[in-house]
Amino acid sequence: MPDSASRKFIDLIFQTSSKWANWDPPIPIKVSLPSGRLMGQTGVFIADGNIYDEAFQESLKQQGLMIDLSHPSCQPIMGAVEEDMIMSSMDVEKSEISITPNVSALDLASTSFKAEFQFQEGKRGAVLVMHKPQQEYIPQGRVLSIIHEAHQLKDKYIVSSIFTCPGYYLYLSNRSAERVTLALTANTSLTTPIDVSAGGEASIDWWTDAQAAFLRKAFDKAGQYRYTPLFDLKRRQHWFKRTFRGAEVQSTEDNLWIKCPQPWDPLDEDRKEDIVYDEVRQGLLVLRINLDL
């Protein structure tokens, strides 16, 4: 089921990075987007508004929250372009490419990225590769600390940072201990080389030998940063949870806004919520109620 596949992939990437994978990277996600909810069946983020909208700014003034989000110091910051980024679940092993009949046909000298991933038998594994990603994020130190009190953000999440890139590759294994080869090459045709000297143009794209239903990849030929494979999602912390033994904890962005946890129980290898875990949790809840009585 595609929905459960997206949720499993997102879950595995979250476990290793504490960030949210976007199952559909061509669908844009922007910094500062508040969310009404996360879809528990798919993990898809549903956006609702933008803290940089004029309507939100006007609402802040009416609530006495004096901050001008249009000021350059409050606008999202673009980070530097980074090297290729690889994120994989804990049981995936990365290694150098092994030479095989298919791989030997590649022009390895023209590859800007190449790797092999070994997955475990009987276990799902996830790999996310971003080509030269760039992070965009809300500046720290003031914005989130002030808008935390805004009424509109009650029970909402907020996208505090995103990673965009011109090319991505995401893969969810099928539990068959497969070994997947991946390369970003200027010539993806294994049978017909491109004659650049004759006026041909080398087309950069992903090459992989993976044969799986849960594989998605794309590369923008113009190098545009049009994909958003990864983002950071935070949830507003309620004031009564920021106390310890009756004493108010000093307010910082880290305790005002916490990492958003997955809206589902631990998932098994069939991408379903673990029934045993749910039964244990229900048992603990009943025990707690009985003790309170």
Image: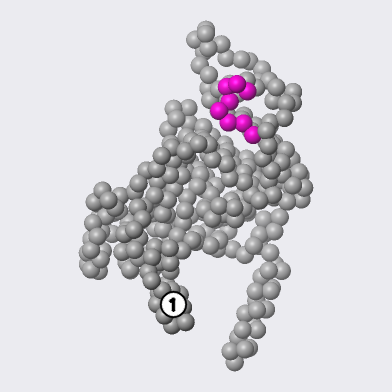
Instruction: Using residue 52 as the reference point, say whether residue 9 is left or right of it.
Output: right
Is residue 156 visible to us here?
no
Q: Position of residue 132 (x, y in %)?
A: 48, 36
Q: Quadrant of residue 80?
A: top left
Q: Tag 1: residue type?
A: Thr
Q: Position of residue 76 (x, y in %)?
A: 34, 48
Q: Position of residue 133 (x, y in %)?
A: 47, 39
Task: Give the residue displayed 53% in from the left and 12% down from the top.
Answer: 196
- Which range of residues does the magenta coloring cover? 108-115
Q: Residues within 10 Å of mark 1 (few under 14, many from 20)?
A: few
- Indicate how the structure is coloured in the image: one colour
Residue 113 sits inside the magenta stretch: yes
The C terminus lies in quadrant: bottom right
Number of numbered tags placed on the structure image: 1
Task: Give the residue displayed 62% in from the left and 31% down from the top.
Answer: 114
Task: Give the residue displayed 56% in from the left and 11% down from the top.
Answer: 195
Q: Quadrant of residue 205?
A: top right
Secondary element under disc 1, as helix, strand or loop, is strand
Is residue 85 visible to us here?
yes
Circle 1 is placed at which residue position?
A: 243
Q: Position of residue 279 (x, y in %)?
A: 69, 73
Of the pair 91 and 217, the residue shown nearer to us = 91
Instruction: Using residue 83 as the reference point, say whether residue 216 is left or right of it.
Output: right
Residue 289 sits inside the magenta stretch: no
Q: Quadrant of residue 160?
A: bottom left
Q: Residue furthest bottom?
A: 293
Q: Is residue 9 above or below residue 185?
A: below
Instruction: Using residue 85 as the reference point, say whether residue 93 is left or right of it.
Output: right
Task: Give the residue displayed 53% in from the left and 62% down from the top.
Answer: 261
